[in-house]
Amino acid sequence: MFGLGAPELLVILIIVLLLFGGRRLPELGRALGRSVREFKKATGREKEEISTWVGAQKEGQAPSSPQDQPEENERFLQDNLESIPGVREAQEIKKTASKIKTAGKFFFRK
């Protein structure tokens, strides 16, 4: 696929070993494994949702779309918002940016 043979992989492994050290390699491997596992799980869910939607289309049923159930979707988002990585940090950054913007308007009035 990428034209990488054994010598190229060996050189890459040596470079990674020099950059991160022997103690960090197991941690990096675990993190990479978790990432790949999470990615596969997420894509699997998407495939499952699409196949359910296609199956409902074939059977002639009206599939439930996000526009059909706005209250349920809002409730689901509010319940699961905190479990998404980085959401809390993004909310804090947004609040800080808003405060800075307000302070800037106050100090730099024309």
Image (cartoon, rainbow, N blue to C red):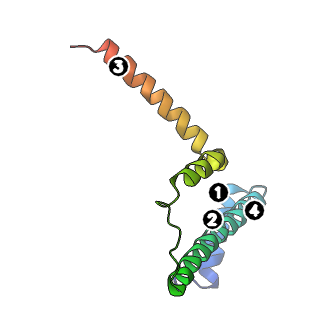
Q: Amino acid at mark 3?
A: Gly
**Mark positioned earlier in the residue sequence (1 or 4):** 1
Mark 2: which secondary structure? helix
* Residue 12 % position (x, y): 61, 71
Does the residue at mark 2 contact the one at mark 3 (Cβ under 8 Å)? no
Per the image, the residue denoted by label 1 is: 19
Note whether 104 is above or below 53 in the view shown.
Answer: above
Q: Amino acid at mark 4?
A: Arg
Does the residue at mark 2 contact the one at mark 1 (Cβ under 8 Å)? yes
* Residue 98 % position (x, y): 43, 27
Per the image, the residue denoted by label 4 is: 30
Per the image, the residue denoted by label 2 is: 15
**Mark positioned earlier in the residue sequence (2 or 3):** 2
Quadrant position of the C terminus in the picture: top left
**Residue 44, located in which quarter of the rendered image?**
bottom right
In front here: 75 or 21?
75
Per the image, the residue denoted by label 3 is: 104
Q: Amino acid at mark 1?
A: Leu
**Mark positioned earlier in the residue sequence (1 or 3):** 1
Label 2, label 3: how many angstroms apart (C-alpha)? 47 Å
Nearer to us of marks 1 and 3 is 3
Label 1, label 3: how many angstroms apart (C-alpha)? 43 Å
Q: Residue at x 49, y 27 (%)?
A: 96
Q: Residues within 10 Å of mark 4 (few under 14, many from 20)?
A: few
Note whether 104 is above or below 87 in the view shown.
Answer: above
